[in-house]
Image (tube, rainbow, N blue to C red):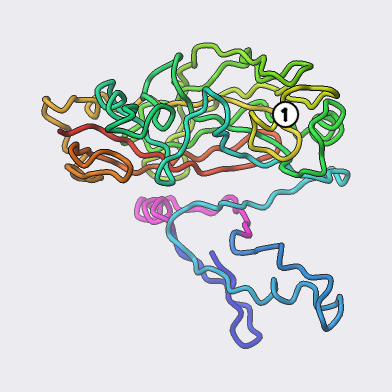
């Protein structure tokens, strides 16, 4: 839905999603809940120094054009009701690309190799991206993983245990789980780190975190979007703190400018039909839903690949923070 301002009249423009149209065709369409979002709004436009006075501070925000109603579900900035009026900072979710165990983006996506042959090709220093820019689907340990931070991304909130307790824990904003929404046409189930995984630093600022084998999240539920499913994985409370006299800056390990509440690792398991090697017959899904026989920016032009672009939607349990992570399934063709 979208609100349209037409010469003083407020018009509600509503269209049905794919799921809504299906339910209407089945004769069981019924509105039982709704969500509000403000994806279009850039709150940095709020200007207390407006030349016409503070009464006009929100003028640019109020004049922001709103997006039209869309048939695809997906609010990036869902509004939520919070009963606690003492909350000063809302946690956000960031993609960590600093830890040695964190996979890094390339071409604005995270590449997920569907087999070891492809992973080896991507890790090549002469023909691939080099190490750290792809993860192997289905791998539980000894590899690079998607790594997320639930954090207060504000440099005014220094990375101390006291601030974590004050601004996150005491406000009931410490995220302990994440809901993962994924396309079940290609992904069989996600995998996440256990609650025992440690994300921590020592008194000298060095990394003291530990890893354990990722857990398969096979308790899967249908998502609101047709063709998508959800699963819930663990997040671990972080202990990444700045200490007086530390020889290492803890920002070496995290993306956040402020205190980190919790962190977690993530991987996926893909449809076995997608995991064929270059000498085997490939699934028709590659050609139907992606691209085949293509060269990829940053990889040697002497090798071609098949790719399918997807995304993972992560929503945390306490703060309801959300992030959409673009991923690309990739398979070596030649």
Residue matched to label 1: 249
The residue that appears at 58% across and 74% down in the rendered structure is 65
Q: Quadrant of residue 310?
A: top left
The image shows residue 6 at horizontal and vertical percentages of 59, 84
Q: Nearer the viewer, residue 85 or 49?
A: 49
Q: Percent position (x, y) of residue 322?
A: 59, 42
Q: Is residue 25 magenta?
A: yes
Residue bounds of the magenta highlight: 17-38
The image quadrant of residue 233 is top right
Residue 140 in percent (x, y) is at 44, 15
Q: Is residue 223 above or below residue 219?
A: below
Quadrant where the C terminus lies? Answer: top left
At 19% from the left and 43% from the top, the residue drawn is 292
Residue name at image x 62 percent, y 24 percent: 235
Picture quadrant where residue 302 is located: top left
Q: Is residue 156 on the magenta stretch?
A: no
Give x and y (percent) for residue 128: 31, 33
Q: Is residue 42 above or below residue 141?
A: below
């Amino acid at each position: 839905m979208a609100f349209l301002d037409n010469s003083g009249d407020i018009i509600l423009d509503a269209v049905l999603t794919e799921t809504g149209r299906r339910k209407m065709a089945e004769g069981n369409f019924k509105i039982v809940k709704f969500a509000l979002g403000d994806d279009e709004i850039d709150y940095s436009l709020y200007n207390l120094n407006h030349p016409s006075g503070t009464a006009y501070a929100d003028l640019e925000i109020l004049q922001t054009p709103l997006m039209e109603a869309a048939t695809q579900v997906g609010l990036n900035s869902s509004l939520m009701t919070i009963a606690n009026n003492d909350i000063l900072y809302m946690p956000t979710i960031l993609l960590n690309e600093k830890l040695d165990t964190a996979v890094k983006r390339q071409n604005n996506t995270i590449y997920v190799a569907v087999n070891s042959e492809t992973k080896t090709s991507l890790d090549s220093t002469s023909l691939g991206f080099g190490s750290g820019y792809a993860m192997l689907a289905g791998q539980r340990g000894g590899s690079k993983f998607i790594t997320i931070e639930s954090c207060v991304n504000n440099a005014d909130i220094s990375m101390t245990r006291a601030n974590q307790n004050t601004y996150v824990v005491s406000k009931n904003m410490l995220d302990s789980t994440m809901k993962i929404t994924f396309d079940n046409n290609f992904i069989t189930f996600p995998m996440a780190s256990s609650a025992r995984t440690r994300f921590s630093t020592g008194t000298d600022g060095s990394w003291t975190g530990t890893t354990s084998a990722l857990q398969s999240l096979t308790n899967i539920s249908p998502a609101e979007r047709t063709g998508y499913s959800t699963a819930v994985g663990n997040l671990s409370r972080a202990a990444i703190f700045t200490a007086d006299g530390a020889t290492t800056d803890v920002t070496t390990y995290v993306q956040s400018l402020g205190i980190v509440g919790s962190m977690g690792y993530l991987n996926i398991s893909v449809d076995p039909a997608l995991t064929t090697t270059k000498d085997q017959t490939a699934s028709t899904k590659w050609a139907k839903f992606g691209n085949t026989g293509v060269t990829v920016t940053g990889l040697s032009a002497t090798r071609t690949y098949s790719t399918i672009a997807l995304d993972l939607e992560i929503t945390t349990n306490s703060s309801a923070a959300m992030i959409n992570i673009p991923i690309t399934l990739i398979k070596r063709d030649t």
